[in-house]
Amino acid sequence: MKLTRRLYCGAMTRGLSLYLDVLRLWAAFMVLLAHWAFPRFTGGDHLWMRRHDLGGDGVVIFFVLSGLLISFAAERRRDEGAGLFAVDRFSRLWSVAIPALIFCYVLDLIGQSAMPDIYAAVGYQGGVSLEALLSGATFTNQIWFWNIQPGSNGPYWSLGYEAWYYLIFALFFFAKGNWRWVLAGTAALIAGPKIALLAPSWLIGVWVWQVIKSGRLQALSRTLAWTLLIAPLVFYFIAHSSFLHWQLRAVSEGWFGPEGMALLGPSDTFLWSAVLGVLTGAHVLGAAAVFSGEAKPVGVKLETAVRWVAGGSFALYLIHFPVMHFAGALLPGGIEDTWRQGFLLLIPILVSYVFAEVSERRRPALRAWMRQQVQNVGLLQKLEKSRA
């Protein structure tokens, strides 16, 4: 097993790991910019970001990276079993999600009382919803056709997808024989069709890791590797220049009708999400081929800085929107004032990284504590069996 771990870690080279950090950081900023471009924050100055749905694209990139990294982590720690795998995954989510639910409701209560109009756009009218807190903490906020949003925190929806992808993957990966199909299928049925519609992009990430792990990319020429890295970017910009994402959404609306599309919620762009998932997967394969060596990709100081900034990207993604609403409710000036628009972008970034220090970066301690509890339960069970 130690040899297997070395092989897996060898496939995840230092250069590729750093590039994935850059990519997830960029995805977080895509979402941030897309939300900053709402007219209630910046008027009509940056509506092109809304027209090109940068936020939706950022989430799809997150899903692909998640599928890749979760499958990598599962294979590297297969011998530890499903229990500790679950601890690792839930500690990752809860380390940011639980504090975010509390913190963002505090901001919402203050901000909404100061300027109700800015919160009306996201349907928040004050108060704290117990249903939203419980469904958010258990990641059941998006199962089937539920679309339960905690306060103004629009980005929280994706956690209600991500957690179910973790669960379905773990059941299939760790279960034996035909049981893997039964258990994973049951979990997928509970999650519902809406979550299933965006699953292809997550599964593409799983497939990408299998290709990287196989070592087949090392046989590619440098020309082909760079082509695989760059060509998806070119196609992405061409697709967006023709608004292919909206054309595909129109196709979906022809199938389901306006009422059906409303039920799909964040999954209403599932056709474009699948296309973007393929493009992202191909791009990452190109990056894996280009960065296949173990040479230092950049200087140590720059690498440390990139990893630190990327290490707060989950917090940035999850709390920037409520912080932006809060700042928008309290800042003076008009929505077209350049200084105000700048602060509405800067404040969420600064607050998010302060928040990361007490949440995302405290995840190792939470994981260690949760692992200890699971291991203690296992020891007690073994002791009881030995006494029986």
Image (cartoon, rainbow, N blue to C red):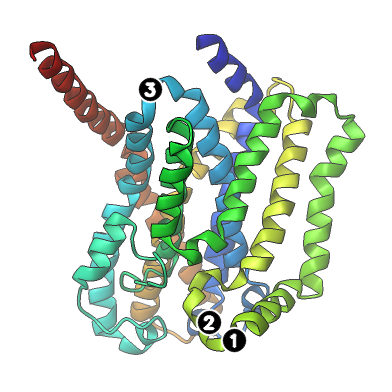
Q: Is residue 278 above or below residue 249?
A: above
Q: What residue is shown with label 2?
A: 260
Q: Quadrant of residue 5?
A: top right
User: Counting other residues with Cα less than 10 Å from the Cα at mark 3, is it few (<14), some (14-19), or many (20 or more)?
Assistant: few
CB-based contact (under 8 Å), mark 2 and mark 1: yes
Q: Position of residue 340 (x, y in %)?
A: 48, 76
Nearer to me, 39 or 216: 216
Q: What residue is shown with label 3?
A: 80
Q: Indicate which disc residue 335 carries.
A: none
Q: Position of residue 285 (x, y in %)?
A: 73, 39
Judged from the image, the secondary structure of the residue bearing numbered disc 3 is: helix
Query: Looking at this rendering, what residue extends furthest in the left direction?
Result: 387
User: Counting other residues with Cα less than 10 Å from the Cα at mark 1, is it few (<14), some (14-19), or many (20 or more)?
Assistant: few
Q: Indicate which disc residue 257 carries.
A: 1
Judged from the image, the secondary structure of the residue bearing numbered disc 1 is: helix
Residue in the image at 78% along x and 32% along y: 290
The disc, 2 or 3, on the residue closer to the chain's N-terminal end is 3
Would residue 16 appear left or right of 125 to someone viewing this image? right
Label 2 to label 1: alpha-carbon separation = 5 Å
